[in-house]
Image: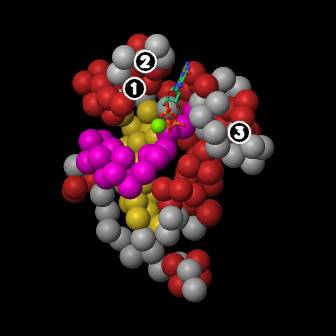
Amino acid sequence: SERTFIMVKPDGVQRGLVGEVLRRFEQRGYKLVALKMIHPPRALLESHYEEHKGKKFYDPLLAYIGSGPVVAMVWEGLNVITVGRKMLGATDPAKSDPGTLRGDYGIVTGRNIVHGSDSESAAKREINLWFRPDEVSNWVHTAERWIYE
Ligand code: GTP
Ligand code: MG
């Protein structure tokens, strides 16, 4: 089983979509192992988005994600990185399938509601960046025997 970093961006928080994001991952059967609201400081965002430094959308992106509190979370389960990205939909909500978070609630790339790690190495890096080890709970999800065979 693996873990991924999912974050409700400031637009998702303002639009009242925190519960919707949580609900979808929770009801899918994934295990929530960390959760917090944080107004991310600039340095944290520079590190989080280092792969995009120098791109034309980098400054607006940091302004957007730094514009208010976000809800950061870690979800655990089988293939949660890949499946989580499918649940988010394409980066551009116009290209996201209906039924995905961005496809149901977004219109433009610059306000696409939610972030999800795109690989195992990114997930590891992002979880360590946003959470201290003691903020991640290793609780026993007793429903797992009804979710996995
Ligand atoms: P995340 O899960 O948020 O990382 O999205 P992604 O992996 O689908 O996209 P990517 O990592 O390439 O880009 C990170 C974020 O930058 C996107 O989610 C958008 O919010 C923003 N972004 C990417 N490309 C563009 C763009 O061309 N224009 C604008 N305005 N924003 C962009
Ligand atoms: Mg990305």
Instruction: Left or right? Give the position of 96 relative to 57.
Output: right
Kind of residue indicated by mark 3: Ser
Front position in the image: 104 or 93 = 93
Secondary structure type for disc 3: loop
Pointer 3 and pointer 1: residues touching (CB < 8 Å)? no
Quadrant containing the C terminus is: bottom right
Q: Which mark is residue 96?
A: 3
How far apart are the alpha carbons under marks 2 and 3? 22 Å
Kind of residue indicated by mark 1: His
Secondary structure type for disc 2: loop
- In the image, residue 40 sits, relative to residue 88, either above or below, namely above
Q: Which mark is residue 11?
A: none
Secondary structure character of the magenta stretch overall:
helix
Give the class, few, some or many, for how many residues have Cα within 10 Å of label 3's Cα (few <14, many ≥20): many
Secondary structure type for disc 1: helix
Query: Which residue position is annotated with label 1?
Result: 52
- What residue is at 22 percent from the left and 55 percent from the top? 133
Which of disc 1 and disc 3 is earlier in sequence?
A: 1
Give the class, few, some or many, for how many residues have Cα within 10 Å of label 2's Cα (few <14, many ≥20): few
What segment is highlighted magenta in the picture?
113-130
- What residue is at 35 percent from the left and 21 percent from the top? 53
Residue 77 appears in the picture as rendered: yes
Which of disc 3 and disc 2 is earlier in sequence?
A: 2
Q: Quadrant of residue 51?
A: top left
Query: Which residue position is annotated with label 2?
Result: 55
Front position in the image: 80 or 147 = 80
Give the class, few, some or many, for how many residues have Cα within 10 Å of label 1's Cα (few <14, many ≥20): few
Q: Nearer the viewer, mark 3 or mark 1?
A: 1
Pointer 1 and pointer 2: residues touching (CB < 8 Å)? yes
